[in-house]
Image (spheres, rainbow, N blue to C red):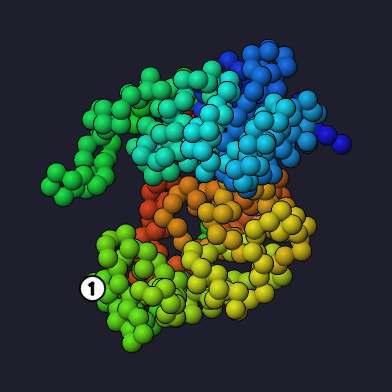
Amino acid sequence: MKLSRDNLHEYQKYGVDFIINNPISALMLECGLGKTITTLTAVSDLMYDYFEISKVLIIAPLRVGLSVWKQECDKWEQLKYLRCSIAIGSADEREKALKADADIYIINRENVEWLVSSGHIDFDMVVIDELSSFKSHQSKRFKALRKVRPKFDRIVGLTGTPAPNGLIDLWAEINLLDMGERLGRYITGFRDEYFKPDKRNGAIVYSYKPLVNAEKRIYEKISDICISMKATDYIKMPERIDNIYEVEMNDKEMKLYRKLEKEMFLPFADGDIDAVNAASLSNKLLQLANGAVYDENQNVKKIHNRKLDALEDLIEASNGKSVLVYYGYKHDKDRIAEKFNIREIRTERDICDWNNGKIQIALAHPASCGHGLNLQRGGSTIIWFGLTWSLELYQQANARLYRQGQNNTVVVHHIVTKGTVDEDVMTALNDKDMGQASLMEAIKARMEGIYK
């Protein structure tokens, strides 16, 4: 039995009206609030009730584009007239899909540059699923889409993490929507207006920090085209418990860690571990905290099993319940697979089996299991074996289980190696989340009678 418009929550109906009434709009809705159905309902109304649009482009993460949008159309009665064509695959397959007779054309974000260069840009509405993936004004996908932005009458940006690395990310995202009307046409002007240099080396500036009242001023500038909602405000969510499971290296292992941290180099007989810069060093230290490191020849140097032992304890404590384990590096995955009977979440069959309780230990990388995948029916326990600096990946990965439709308390375990960069990552994630939370709060939609 299909769902109908009556099944929409009030906040989703508000979002539908917002898209219809605003040719430029950004829905900054937390994971699980139904950005997809909200947008598709607005598209259907604009196409078949208002006759304002006839051809829509949806730019989505690869796996979301392959399944989620089309599946949502099939689930809802009010979307039954929408015809979807998925332009993902080889160049020939994409060309064929773009020439098909349809209402909605779905492409993955990696092919935006190809789409623009091929001339297939005759759309009157564009939806960017995960607007934050266009946060870099220097990326090819941003430059390509920005070049043809004036050709689109309507545009919608969807994201649950509008400023994953701070307010500076907002310029490219908002510029893509309004072509510079609110935050300025150029990134340099935006920086000069709202930021001051933070970390620098002479004339070279590595990062910026907001000026006093910059947040408030930015929020005011963009509030007319943005609505923001937090899942905890608008839907009844189960409890979420975050747990730090601390492990500690022995003196010998910590000595290796400190040597690498200080000298950016660890000598081995068959291949050295060399960090050429600060970013590389952080990467190597994260690996070592996990228990193994790639050397200069891409061979794996195993240092310790502290996290593997902790993972075993956490799996045992789950008493047979399904757990979703996030890893950071391929050698993490390989070592986990050697020790446990795991299955990696990669295909639609994997997702289906997970949701049907057929997988006890699921393994996934946060970058490939982030946006849009619905895994909440299969379990309620997440274990972070390897941590990520990316707030966006972190939040999206957690939201695979902690989202609308989850009926159980969600437990998120973080295996943290004491005295290492792991602790810095956890601090950074918490600090970034505070900054983003203020953004979401500042432009949050305030409506009367919203279901809570």
Give the side of residue 184 with respect to residue 44, left or right.
left
The reply, left or right, for residue 97 in relation to residue 416 is: right
Quadrant containing the C terminus in the rendered view: top right
Instruction: Find residue 384 and report its horizontal and vertical position in percent.
Output: 53, 63
Residue 375 sits above or below residue 92 on the image = below
Residue at the extreme front? 92
Q: Is residue 64 visible?
A: no
Q: Residue at x 27, y 40 (%)?
A: 209
- SS of the residue at dot 1? helix
- Amino acid bearing label 1: Glu
Residue at the farthest left position: 202
Which quadrant would residue 216 be assigned to in this image?
Answer: top left
Label count reads 1
Residue 106 x, y percent position in the rendering: 63, 36
Q: Nearer the viewer, residue 97 or 449?
A: 97
Q: Is residue 43 visible?
A: yes
Crowding near the residue tagged with mark 1, few <14, some 14–19, many ≥20 C-alpha atoms within 10 Å = few
Q: Quadrant of the N terminus?
A: top right
Pick out the residue farthest to the bottom.
269
Which image quadrant is residue 195 in?
Answer: top left
Residue 288 percent across, percent down from the top left: 40, 73
What residue is drawn where x is 70% and y is 71%? 319
Residue lying furthest right in this view? 1
> Residue at (27%, 65%) from the top-left corner?
276
406 lies above or below 138: below
Location of residue 451 by image quarter: top right
What residue would you read off at disc 1?
Answer: 263
Q: Between residues 246 and 22, which one lies in front from this camera angle?
A: 22
On the image, the x and y values in percent for residue 317 come to: 64, 72
Query: From the viewer's perspective, is 362 left or right of 330?
Result: right
Q: Residue at x 53, y 41 (%)?
A: 111
